[in-house]
Image (cartoon, rainbow, N blue to C red):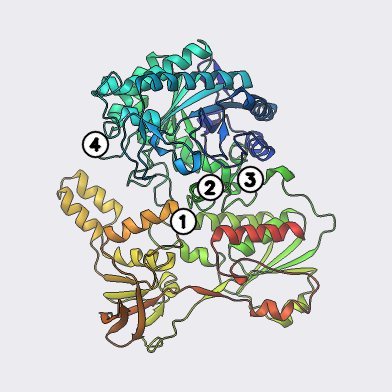
């Protein structure tokens, strides 16, 4: 595979063409490198990646306290320790130099954000201070001094972040750069800040030290730069001595989803190709690349020279090694859920991972074999149960798993049904494959009760019995027209033309989008009609977004989707609007009858007509069986929704922890 061939960036030779782009992890303390950060990256280096970028490494005070800092010499020893750990595994490492511009949070950093112009950010809703010419010169010097510190710490290269809407991006964009001096105005002058940074960094580190730029292949901002302008910018940066370009998608503020699971795999590789056609140095393609076979396809089709896999490496630090050995089924793919990574970053928590409960906990050295192998029974084949079984079997226990239905996956099977959520099935496939590889005895269609559990004679029992959908305590809730949203997702129930969904959480919103899409044209039809000029764009959008059902979501709270992660919720709300779903908030259902749903809103009662009423009002733990057996057996653990309804991230983590304590 081309993926595993060497490649040079400047004078730096990499063992293969897989790079791990920088991603904020939140593992630092007051900007200092910690053991947690070192061991996290050591594990990824041991897994065989060609180049690791760490960062952002903040060049000044405009950062979070749990970020890496590189704005003072006192940080060099810790950074050197990190570099040493990665070098011990034979892998190259680069520092990403970070300055957020108007994306800085004053309430966190303690200082007002700075930017080319005083244009407020929709992301932070804060107005930045416009940099003076002297401050611009000083900022350029900060990039240079940070690059020198990176070199002194032993990093093999530096990367300037000029993407995502951070400071360099803000100077380049006419949306955020309203200056009329030498650093603003036409495109040539808007490029000047980035070009000056590149030139000064190159001068500071010398002619042979690799310098890269991380660029957004397109701003995806109204009135912003497109791939054409970014390509022209990169061509000029190359003349200033930049050795490679690491190409991502748009700004944090864009309404175009970037890295959620709704984004098709490899969607933004075309941006890298646009840059590659304008420069002579290597180009890295990034975003939603979670499969080495897809990475190989991107290289073979000459979209890029290298492939960036950031969250994919969080999900499986051994991804490269497994792929090189042909162990593709063992790769634990990132599913783009964002529950453990981006949602954590935006809430200033340390990064974890839904599919890899060990992520961020590498200090303990990974799983250890059990001193005394046990006979273990896991009851329930959802994500918590399968992760518990996987972990226990990996440690050498003899594991049997009972699942009462005819398939494994639990609620993840339902979670994978709505549009843009199919990656949940990827995790199910991985866990099922692990059951086979590790010799877990799986019995489907197996009803568990206190008698057969006790009779099984296990040394330890893990109860992962999940949850059941909650009922709505109102008159008419047992009408024939009332069904559970779970049953619709499972294909056990159908719905009429007029549908009212009671409950505006994740299940209600995603089911609403599923139903609202009924009758719209699919992607293949859209492509065929578009390339053949069969319809104009407005008609195509109508055909792709106007379905055959009238869908209404009723929610008691002031807004819907409050249980959806911060990095994904805005996309779900955007989809509800796009597909014409009516949302009724601050509304309490008082009754259901043959005509529809009676709701009280602001003191008034109204009837929302419906042919079908779907209930999505939460769930309740199926814990009764555990209560029966915990007094009869010496070692019983309860995990996942059986304890209390929770996100998949928490359920998997509980399953993992149960498997480690046996």
Q: Is residue 434 left or right of residue 574?
A: right
| Gap between marks 3 and 4 measured at Cα | 39 Å
Q: Which image quarter: residue 280?
A: top left
Q: Is residue 532 left or right of residue 292?
A: left
What residue appears at the point 79 percent right and 74 percent down from the top-left corner? 457
Q: Residue 248, percent across and down? A: 41, 35
What residue appears at the point 53 percent right and 76 percent down from the top-left corner? 468
Disc 3 designates what residue? 360
Disc 4 designates what residue? 223
Q: Considering only vertical position in the picture, is 532 above or below 206?
A: below
Q: Earlier in the sequence, mark 4 or mark 2?
A: 4
Q: Earlier in the sequence, mark 4 or mark 1?
A: 4
Instruction: Indicate the secondary structure of the residue bearing disc 3.
Output: loop
| Gap between marks 4 and 1 measured at Cα | 29 Å
Instruction: Indicate the secondary structure of the residue bearing disc 1.
Output: loop
Instruction: Indicate the secondary structure of the residue bearing disc 2.
Output: loop
Q: Which mark is residue 338?
A: none
Q: Earlier in the sequence, mark 3 or mark 1?
A: 3
Q: Earlier in the sequence, mark 3 or mark 4?
A: 4
Mark 2, other Cα within 10 Å: few <14 / some 14–19 / many ≥20: some
Asked if the residue under mark 1 is in contact with the one under mark 3, i.e. CB atoms within 8 Å, the reply is: no
Disc 1 designates what residue? 565
Q: Nearer the viewer, mark 4 or mark 2?
A: 2
**Can the viewer see residue 274 in this picture?**
no
Q: Is residue 632 left or right of residue 574?
A: right
**Can the viewer see residue 11 in this picture?**
yes
| Gap between marks 3 and 1 measured at Cα | 20 Å
Q: Residue 286, percent across and down? A: 44, 36
Pick whichever, 171 or 448, lies toward us.
171
Q: Nearer the viewer, mark 2 or mark 3?
A: 2
Mark 1, other Cα within 10 Å: few <14 / some 14–19 / many ≥20: many
Q: Considering only vertical position in the picture, is 516 above or below 335?
A: below
């Amino acid at each position: 595979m081309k993926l595993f061939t060497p490649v040079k960036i400047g004078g730096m030779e990499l063992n293969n063409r897989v790079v791990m782009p920088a991603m904020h992890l939140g593992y630092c303390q007051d900007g200092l490198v910690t053991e947690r950060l070192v061991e996290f990256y050591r594990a990824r280096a041991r897994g065989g990646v060609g180049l690791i970028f760490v960062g952002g490494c903040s060049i000044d005070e405009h950062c979070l306290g749990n970020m890496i800092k590189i704005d003072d010499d006192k940080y060099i020893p810790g950074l050197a320790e990190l570099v040493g750990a990665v070098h011990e595994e034979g892998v190259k490492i680069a520092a990403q130099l970070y300055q957020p511009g108007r994306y800085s949070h004053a309430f966190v950093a303690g200082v007002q954000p700075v930017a080319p112009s005083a244009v407020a950010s929709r992301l932070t809703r804060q107005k930045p201070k416009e940099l003076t010419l002297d401050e611009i010169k000083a900022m350029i010097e900060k990039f240079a001094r940070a690059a020198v510190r990176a070199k002194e710490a032993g990093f093999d290269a530096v990367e300037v972040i000029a993407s995502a809407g951070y400071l360099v991006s803000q100077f380049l964009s006419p949306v955020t750069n309203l200056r009329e001096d030498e650093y603003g105005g036409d495109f040539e002058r808007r490029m000047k800040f980035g070009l000056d940074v590149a030139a000064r960094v190159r001068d500071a580190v010398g002619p042979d030290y690799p310098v890269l730029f991380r660029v957004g292949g397109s701003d995806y901002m109204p009135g912003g730069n497109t791939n054409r302008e970014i390509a022209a910018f990169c061509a000029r940066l190359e003349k200033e001595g930049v050795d490679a370009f690491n190409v991502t998608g748009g700004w944090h503020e864009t309404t175009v989803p970037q890295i959620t699971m709704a984004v098709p795999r490899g969607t933004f590789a075309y941006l890298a190709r646009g840059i590659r056609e304008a420069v002579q140095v290597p180009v890295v393609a990034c975003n939603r690349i979670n499969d080495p076979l897809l990475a190989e396809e991107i290289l073979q089709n000459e979209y890029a020279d290298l492939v960036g896999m950031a969250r994919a490496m969080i999900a499986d630090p051994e991804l490269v090694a497994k792929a090189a050995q042909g162990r593709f089924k063992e790769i634990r793919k990132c599913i783009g859920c964002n529950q453990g990574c981006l949602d954590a970053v935006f809430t200033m928590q340390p990064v974890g991972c839904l599919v890899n409960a060990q992520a961020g906990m590498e200090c303990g050295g990974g799983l250890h074999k059990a001193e005394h192998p046990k006979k273990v029974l896991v009851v329930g084949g959802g994500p918590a149960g399968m992760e518990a079984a996987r972990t226990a079997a990996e440690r050498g226990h003899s594991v049997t798993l009972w699942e009462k239905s005819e398939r494994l996956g639990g609620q993840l099977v339902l979670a994978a049904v709505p549009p843009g959520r199919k990656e949940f099935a990827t995790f199910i496939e991985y866990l099922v494959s692990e059951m086979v590889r590790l010799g877990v005895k799986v019995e489907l269609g197996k009803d568990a009760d206190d008698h057969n559990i006790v009779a099984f004679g296990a040394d330890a029992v893990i109860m992962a019995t999940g949850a059941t959908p909650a009922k709505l305590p109102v008159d008419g809730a047992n009408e024939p027209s009332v069904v559970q949203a779970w049953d619709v997702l499972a294909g056990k129930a159908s719905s009429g033309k007029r549908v009212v969904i009671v409950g505006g959480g994740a299940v209600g919103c995603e089911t609403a989008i599923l139903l609202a899409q009924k009758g719209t044209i699919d992607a293949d039809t859209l492509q065929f009609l578009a390339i053949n000029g069969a319809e104009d764009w407005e008609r195509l959008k109508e055909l792709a977004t106007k379905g055959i059902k009238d869908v209404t979501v009723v929610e008691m709270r002031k807004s819907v989707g409050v249980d959806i992660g911060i990095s994904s919720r805005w996309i779900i709300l955007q989809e509800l609007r796009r597909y014409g779903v009516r949302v009724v908030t601050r509304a309490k259902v008082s009754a259901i009858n043959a005509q529809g749903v009676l709701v009280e809103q602001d003191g008034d009662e109204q009837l929302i007509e419906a042919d079908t009423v779907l209930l999505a009002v939460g769930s309740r733990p199926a814990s009764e069986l555990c209560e029966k057996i915990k007094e009869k057996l010496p070692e019983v653990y309860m995990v996942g929704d059986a304890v209390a309804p929770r996100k998949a991230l928490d359920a998997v983590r509980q399953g993992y922890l149960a498997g480690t304590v046996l």
